[in-house]
Image: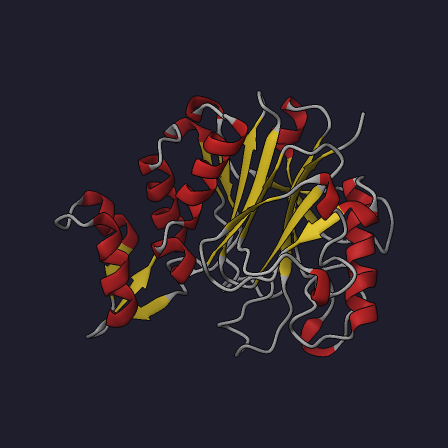
Amino acid sequence: MEPFVRRQGNKPDEPGVLELAGWMAGTPGLAAGFTTRIGGVSQGCFDSLNCALHVHDAEEDVIANRRRVAGVAGIPFENWVCGEQVHGNRVHAVTEEDRGRGWFGRATAIQDADALVTDAEGVMLASFYADCVPLIFLDPVKRVVAVAHAGWKGTVTRIGPETVHMMQKRYLSSIEHIRAAIGPSIGPCCYEVDNRVLEQVRAVWNEEEGEEERAVIRSSRPGHAWLDLRELNRQLLKQAGILPTNIECTNLCTGCDTGMFFSHRKEGGATGRMMSFIGWKKG
């Protein structure tokens, strides 16, 4: 079953948001989901719900789009937090003092942070994507949440497991309680990579080719293969100890549906960004 469910809005200008409906139904006070490209004010190649400032969209349009998403998510606009993503594996522990960082302008963003984690109530974590894999985490017992941006570089440097380790080390999350959702991203149908990338992907397992690797890599033309980056992240999260039954994965491909999603690869790099988000509403 698809974990990311389209929010049924009742306003004509409401942004297109896919909610982690199962998580939210079972966890009172949680807001979690992923935006589409629909329902914003941005123009041209950023049409229309671009949520990122770093792609040279008009800043006032991005802020307006972010306000729309904050409105449906139900957490005050000034409490959102985002980082300056660099395709790395650094995890930043967000505190209440970080509220608003990066949200009104890039200068205040948390630097070199591709993953954010917090247990602060009323703080919303956000991260941006246009083909890379969104990883969203929840520990409903310790009330810890996290987002991670997993491009192929972040994936092979284990940003997913690094986020899990931060949840365990700083917040004392038990591995059996941690849940993960793998969101809309480019699928193996659309993501062909060369041997330079494949060598680093194979080094992640450090083992002979087997069933798990064949699920991730499928040969195409000489020196290239189709890569299932979502499945690779799922396998790495299993290696980190998350129970397979606690990992949910989308079937939505950003490359296949550029009417719904921005795709850096399919749109030649000139495009906007979707946003993952998760946080606790204040009671």
Q: Quadrant of the C terminus?
A: top right
- Say whether residue 96 is left or right of residue 84: right
Please determine whether, in this image, residue 89 is positioned above or below residue 131.
above
Counting every numbered tag in the picture gives 0
Q: Residue at x 41, y 27 (%)?
A: 245
Q: Residue 270: x and y, percent?
A: 60, 78
- In the rendered structure, the answer to whether residue 155 lies left or right of residue 82 reads left
Locate residue 99, reporting x and y percent.
75, 47
Whether residue 9 is visible, yes or no, is: no
Name the image quarter holding residue 123.
top right
- Depth check: give the residue in front, 167 or 125: 167
Left or right of residue 6, residue 205 in this image? left
Q: Residue at x 33, y 42 (%)?
A: 235
Position of residue 163 measured from the top left corner of the image (x, y, whole percent): 47, 42
Q: Residue 52: horizontal and vertical position, in percent?
A: 68, 64
Answer yes or no: is residue 4 visible.
yes
Q: Residue at x 23, y 64 (%)?
A: 199
Please report the residue visible at 40 percent of the width from the left and 31 percent of the height from the top.
242
The figure's colour scheme reads secondary structure
Relative to 273, say whether 34 is above or below: above
| Image: 247 above or below 47 | above
Q: Is residue 101 left or right of 210 when viewed as pictured? A: right
**In the figure, residue 194 lies in which quadrant?**
bottom left
